[in-house]
Image: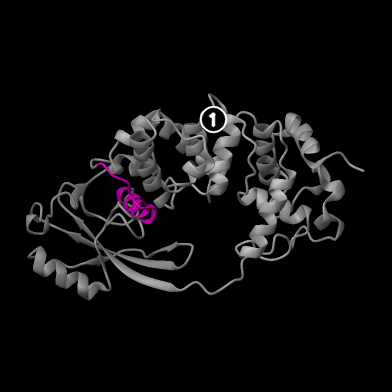
């Protein structure tokens, strides 16, 4: 009979686990929180430089709360899923206003903050405070679904309920912080989505998926459906100083709060808008199309370049909703495909 699941995992972690990640140094609830949110839907290697820059910009929760949303999103630009950044900012302000600037140490209070779910809250309390808390992030779901051969997509309530019950059963009463890190490390390094390294796994002896040859089939993937396609034209208004006219998007929706080019259904609509608001009949130059995939649809972008010979089109300026932008001259985050278009132009790949 093998040793308990947690004991084997902890023994493995001491020798093979990850112990030098930036958020594992100077551990605090704030640093754990930021790292856990950044790691949602994002690989560790991608997160590391973002986390380091974020901590330099906002070393404390008070610094994050006092910053403008534009500054927060500027530090988030490129990580995607921008609601995460907006929710971090809102939650920091709530912590300062309602909890005297200290992260709550109760699960329910943490879950009440924007963008913090049950697993994220549990990870904060486990890693920062050593509380006995079960977590269930993507890596842990994969480990447990395979170990117990739990079939069915874990987006289904009944499957998720089974996984939570198993997570709670296996979570030890002591060494909780080390166990939480260990099971996340196992999923990230050995029990990977593809080609899991079962021969090196410390809990392979009683892994049902391995015994049944199901490790490549489990966890059951989300049922596939065809991703709808959408098309949009972006109008790149450029002045003689190589500044681009950008619009600050509404806080809600895609790229909420970020700077972007004005969008139109087609080139005819863009030309009509330019004629009315910019008093110009200059030709719109189509540039190389760009495709950007979201979780629920794929966006086909046709950039249309419009060079102006005069200054700012003041007649369409509305408070801070429009800015002239060049190389970080304006505060605010930039959506990834918008930055790609700018990079192409600035590198003179497109004239």
Is disc 1 surrounded by few (<14), some (14 to 19) or many (20+) residues within 10 Å? some
Left/right of residue 315 with respect to residue 165 in the rendered view: left
The magenta span reads: 331-346
Vertical placement of residue 346 versus 66, above or below = below
Magenta part, dominant SS? helix
Q: At 69% across and 53% down in the image, what residue appears?
A: 165
The image quadrant of residue 291 is bottom left
> Is 303 on the left-hand or right-hand side of 277?
right
- Name the quarter where the C terminus is drawn: bottom left
Please name the residue shown 87% across and 56% down the image. Answer: 211
Q: Residue at x 80, y 42 (%)?
A: 5
Q: Position of residue 159 (x, y in %)?
A: 67, 62
Asked if residue 128 shows in the view, the reply is yes
Query: Residue 299, image x and y in percent?
Result: 40, 67
Q: Quadrant of the N terminus?
A: top right
Dividing the picture into quadrants, the one containing residue 149 is bottom right
Seen as rendered, the residue at the extreme right is 1
Q: Nearer the viewer, residue 223 or 324?
A: 223
Horizontally, residue 240 falls left or right of residue 209, namely left
Disc 1 is placed on an element classified as helix
Q: Is 193 inside the magenta-drawn segment?
A: no
Q: Position of residue 117 (x, y in %)?
A: 51, 49
Please name the residue that numbered disc 1 is placed on. Answer: 22
What residue is drawn where x is 23% and y is 40%?
A: 329
Q: Position of residue 158 (x, y in %)?
A: 65, 64
Q: Taking 181 as reference, is 248 left or right?
A: left
Would you place residue 21 above or below residue 111 in this image? above
Question: Up-down: is 80 above or below 212?
Answer: above
Q: Is residue 21 visible?
A: no
Residue 345 colored magenta? yes
Identify which residue, 150 or 42, lies in the foreground. Answer: 150
Given residues 348 and 147, the one toward you in this image is 147
């Amino acid at each position: 009979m093998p040793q308990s699941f947690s004991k084997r995992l902890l023994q493995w972690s001491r020798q093979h686990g990850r112990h030098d990640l930036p958020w594992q140094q100077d551990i605090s609830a704030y640093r754990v929180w930021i790292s856990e949110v950044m790691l949602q839907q994002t690989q560790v290697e991608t997160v590391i430089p973002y986390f380091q820059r974020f901590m330099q910009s906002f070393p404390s929760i008070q610094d994050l709360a006092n910053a403008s949303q534009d500054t927060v999103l500027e530090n988030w630009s490129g990580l995607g899923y921008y609601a995460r950044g907006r929710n971090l900012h809102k939650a920091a302000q709530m912590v300062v206003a309602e909890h005297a600037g200290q992260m709550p140490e109760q699960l329910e209070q943490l879950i009440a903050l924007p963008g913090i779910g049950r697993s994220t809250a549990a990870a904060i309390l486990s890693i920062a405070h050593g509380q006995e808390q079960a977590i269930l992030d993507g890596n842990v779901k994969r480990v447990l679904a395979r170990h117990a051969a739990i079939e069915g997509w874990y987006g289904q309530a009944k499957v998720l309920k089974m996984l939570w019950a198993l997570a709670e059963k296996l979570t030890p009463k002591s060494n909780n912080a080390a166990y939480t890190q260990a099971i996340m490390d196992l999923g990230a390094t050995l029990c990977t989505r593809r080609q899991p390294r079962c021969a090196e796994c410390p809990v392979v002896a009683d892994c049902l998926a391995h015994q049944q040859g199901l490790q490549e089939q489990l966890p059951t993937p989300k049922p596939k459906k065809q991703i709808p396609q959408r098309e949009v034209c972006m109008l790149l208004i450029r002045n003689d100083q190589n500044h681009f006219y950008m619009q600050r998007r509404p806080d809600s929706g895609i790229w909420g709060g970020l700077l972007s080019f004005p969008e139109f259904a087609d080139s005819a609509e863009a030309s009509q808008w330019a004629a009315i608001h910019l008093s110009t009949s200059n030709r719109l130059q189509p540039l190389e199309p760009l495709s950007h995939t979201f979780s629920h649809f794929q966006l086909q972008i046709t950039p249309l370049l419009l060079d102006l010979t005069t200054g700012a089109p003041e007649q369409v300026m509305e408070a801070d909703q429009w800015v002239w932008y060049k190389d970080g001259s304006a505060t605010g985050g930039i959506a990834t495909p918008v930055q790609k278009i700018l990079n192409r132009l600035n590198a003179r790949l497109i004239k």
